[in-house]
């Protein structure tokens, strides 16, 4: 029995190695993404909100965003990936393919204003979600995250991570085209 105990770590290692190999094969075949977490909000209405606008003394609510296809991009100055993503968002805003709204998530509003002034502001408006309440309602797990909202206010996609040209072409453009076709 004592000799059998010597092989337990080897058996555990072999089982774990097989599990990791199986997951890696699923990732390679596109059957599994380790970063993709399902969102309970996809195909459901965008949660109701009324939040201050970073760039003004005004407020924005859910109802004011309805009637257009838009992106809600969750970002923060403390988020290193948001710094990487920002140049693509500026390019996206320049192209004007879709309305882009920001959600400054659990951040200092003054730092966020400076950040946008220095780096450029790609957003039509930026909502200030200082306490993270809208983020909680959206199911935000971190920044950046981007949501596609259709003209009826339905969440059609949640993307976690930085947007870039490849992700835009592969995941966002086909969906935006589909929404346009649905609208007639």
Image: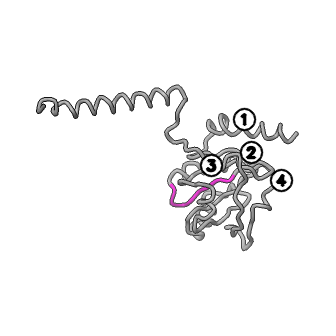
Mark 2 packing: few (<14 Cα in 10 Å), some, or many (20+)? Answer: few
Asked where in the image residue 174 lies, by quadrant, the reply is: top right
Instruction: Determine contact: label 3, label 2, CB under 8 Å.
Output: no
Dot 2 or dot 4: first in sequence order is: 4
Is residue 174 visible in the rendered image? The answer is: yes
Mark 4 packing: few (<14 Cα in 10 Å), some, or many (20+)? Answer: few
Task: Give the label, 2 or 4, closer to the camera.
Answer: 4
Q: Which residue is mark 1?
A: 174
Q: Is residue 144 left or right of residue 178?
A: left
Whether residue 168 is situated above or below residue 46 in the rendered picture: above
Quadrant in which the N terminus is drawn = top left
Mark 1 packing: few (<14 Cα in 10 Å), some, or many (20+)? Answer: few
Q: CA distance from mark 3 to mark 2?
A: 31 Å
Dot 3 or dot 2: first in sequence order is: 3
Is label 3 in a helix, a strand or a loop? loop
Residue in the foreground of this view, choosing between 109 and 38 = 38
**Any mark on residue 95, and which?**
2
User: Measuring 69% from the left and 40% from the top, which residue is drawn there?
Assistant: 172
Quadrant in which the C terminus is drawn = top right
x, y percent for residue 14? 29, 28
Q: Which residue is mark 4?
A: 67
Dot 4 or dot 1: first in sequence order is: 4
Dot 1 or dot 2: first in sequence order is: 2
Q: CA distance from mark 3 to mark 1?
A: 21 Å
Residue in the foreground of this view, choosing between 69 and 17 = 17
């Amino acid at each position: 029995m004592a000799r059998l105990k010597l092989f337990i770590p080897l058996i555990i290692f072999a089982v774990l190695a097989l599990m990791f190999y199986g997951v890696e094969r699923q990732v390679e075949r596109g059957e599994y993404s380790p970063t993709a977490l399902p969102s309970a909000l996809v195909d459901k209405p965008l949660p109701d909100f009324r939040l201050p606008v970073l760039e003004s003394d005004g407020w924005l609510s859910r109802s004011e965003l309805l009637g257009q296809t838009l992106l809600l991009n969750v970002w923060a100055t403390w988020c290193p990936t948001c710094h990487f993503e920002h140049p693509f968002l500026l390019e996206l805003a320049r192209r004007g393919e879709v309305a882009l709204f920001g959600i400054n998530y659990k951040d200092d509003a003054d730092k966020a204003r400076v950040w946008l002034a220095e780096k450029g502001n790609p957003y039509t408006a930026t909502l200030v979600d200082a306490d993270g309440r809208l983020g909680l309602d959206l199911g935000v797990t971190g920044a950046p995250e981007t949501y596609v909202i259709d003209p009826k206010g339905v969440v059609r996609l949640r993307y976690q991570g930085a947007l870039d040209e490849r992700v835009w072409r592969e995941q966002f453009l086909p969906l935006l085209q589909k929404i346009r076709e649905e609208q007639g």
